[in-house]
Amino acid sequence: MYLLREITAVRPYEGGVECAVRAVRCLELPGTPGYLTGEPPDGQGIETTMPNLPELPVPPLDPRGFVLRVAFGSEDAVRITLAPEGARVLDEEPGWLGIVLDGGQGYGPAPRVRTADVASDGGGRGTPETVLQTGRLRVRVARRPFALAVEDTATGRTLLRTGERLRQVAGFPMAPPVLAAEAGSDGEAGTVLNLELGPDERITGFGEQFGPLVKNGQRLRLRVEDALGTGTGMAYKPVPVWHSTSGYLGFLNTGAVVTADVGHRRPDVLGLTVHDEALDLWVIGAPDPKDRLSRYTGLTGRAAVPPLWSLGYWMGRCRYHSAAEMNDVGDTMRKHEVPCDVLHLDPDWLVVDRLNCDFIWNTERFGDRAEFVAGLRERGLRLSLWELPYLDPASPRHAEARARGYLVRDADGEPAQVAGTPTPDGRPRALLDFTNPEAAAWWQDLHTDFLADGVAVFKTDFGEGLPDGTVPADGTPAHHAHNLYPLRYNGAVSAAIAARTGRNALVWGRSGWAGSQRYPGQWGGDAESTVAGMRSTVRGGLSYALSAPGFWSHDIGGFFGPELTPELYVRWTQLGALSPLMRAHGLRPREPWAFGDRALEIARRWVRLRYALLPYLWQTAHESAAHGWPLMRPLGLEFPGDPVAATVDDAFLLGPDLLVVPVFDDGPGPVRRRFWVPEGGWTDLLTGERHTGPGYAERTVALEDMPVLVRDGCWLPRLDVDAAVRSTDDLPDRPWRLELYGTGDGTGDGVRERAGRELTGFDGTPTRVRVEGDTVYAEGSQPFAAHAVRQGARR
């Protein structure tokens, strides 16, 4: 293992500087915390006067050269790359792994960077430094001993600093700034970045993690896995992106496994271990986390607004076994007057359907595909089809793909075998190699006839099963390939849908990595049908929102586990109705009539409420596409100055103005629910009850109810939904109704009313809306009801 010790040379580099770094061999002390090199003890800061200092083995210096590059992409974003001399990353463009888009130019105009060498910063470091500064950020690179710090010049805050100050009693460093491990027997190197955590600093993010939203005290292994649920400690969509309450977003541009130790081993250390020889860290500094997400998604891509129908109600089951069964579900949905837009069909549409997708339609079960899709469309329904990127040797497509060289190969040149998911019969499934352009095009072409027949969307399931040690066709290093596989898989299918339909693409993906937000949507995997499963699902969505913001959802009712109670089904349906996307799905029936008359009545009311709120969701979807913000938002995203809001992971905001408070319970009786209300005035959407924050509120919530609070100042567009609404096809000609919250009381809100608002209509064009008195004036294609409705005026 090597410890980076000193900067030996500094030279100009585009947008910043490049430094030569000398590293020396070190060892981790046996039986006690700390690291030791072969340098003189006093030069390492060791307390040589300690009376019980033991005799210690001294490693040879064996110096090694590294390269550090510090380059600004904009006033508030800096890229810090550190690698051994000659490492591949030093010769590659930022987008070489397919995560960063447009060559890394998504930050905006290149800033003017000032560079200076100083003897000391006057703050006690007492060491020569190279200081780089833009209008917003300052980076300090200490020469010897090597250290890094990033500061916000506007606020005067230190955003991050390496952990050189953290030592044990004998002076041995416990968190050296950077440690580099040589490749072991598995050929995998490792680079450790140790950052000192501030006394009140909280860390969030790291993708779809199902534990508490604030990651302090946790140790996370960021490796894409078939997590087999939401309570196993694994993740379908880990993302090496995090936020710090000190005011920055960190992004590791890598496909390698990352271990994030957030004060778990050392209470004051954020330790980031990248299982790669290089560290490619991007730091975006801004006090507002929404600004940070805009910068980050400008770099890695944003989701386009999916079709309106995708925001409707989806119904699925594992599995529907025939066309007759699905048509009956559609007919019963219409009989019970429950709006629905999509029916999902899991693998029974295939002839060979066990962990295989070869696009060979099962006519015995589902008849002619075009006729089947047309029959659903007559019922106002669209078809979603399951797929995965694996091929069974029992399928004729396997032999075709193997002969053409389209399968991922192992180090021996043989087709690699799916790992991590048990196969039902022991046959080794192969994986399509999406790094081979011809293979990706072949896979995309297999979708063509399905899309031509009217299939609306594909559920891109799995993608977590690429084994280690493969040899991708494009030369992607093996240790990057596993985590990048789902990004490439979902990207290929999204591109196929967009190219063959001419509309914004939508998939329903389970696995993901950094950049996956640009391929909407995703869902939270196989949650257990328990209160704990529902609770962890919400946490996963909130954590994912901070790292891959966009369109995320979950299986209403959970996918597996104990028989779902009608009451938990109702509570989960309420949550789903106020989620970015809404789909019920599981191993057993999830149709609302399967849970009794009371559950059906309540579920129907909440599904209708969702359709009534689609004008608001439509605005939020366009806001997300424009700015890179999630639809489902942790409270801290909208209220970053509220220390309590930053920790809340049992409630969320849908868009900027709806506070959703799920009820985690599976019993029939009323539930006492305590929840945090952020600053300002809020009105319950259903009861009209008023709340003022910041502070806790408490309510007794009947099974029929769930707290949904609307923020003062909100112009809430909605429409009336009755029994005649079967799907979103019935909505475009219906006038929107405008509800104004917390206005009309002489507090100055009337000025904003006269200024008006611009809303995006269902046809995608803007309509300018203003209110005078109670009259609505709309200029544009979207029809509005003539009178505004005022709600929750301040008292």
Image (cartoon, grey):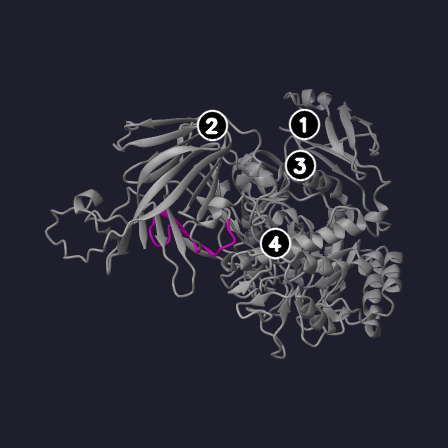
Q: Which residue is found at the position 62% from the left and 57% from the top?
A: 435
Give the percent coordinates (x, y) of residue 394: 70, 77
| Pointer 4 or 2: first along the chain | 2
Q: Nearer the viewer, residue 488 or 214?
A: 488
The mark nearer the N terminus, 4 or 3, is 4
Q: Is residue 608 shown in magenta?
A: no
The disc label shown at residue 487, or none: 4
Q: Position of residue 309 (x, y in %)?
A: 78, 49
Amino acid type indicated by mark 2: Arg
Write down the residue under mark 3: 626
Q: Are marks 4 and 2 in contact (CB under 8 Å)?
A: no
| Residue 743 tag number | 1
Label 4 and label 1: CA atoms lie apart by 45 Å
- Cα–Cα span, label 2 and label 3: 24 Å
What amino acid is at disc 3? Ala
> Marks 2 and 1: which is nearer the front?
2
Instruction: Kindly identify the amino acid type of the residue bearing the numbered disc 4.
Output: Leu
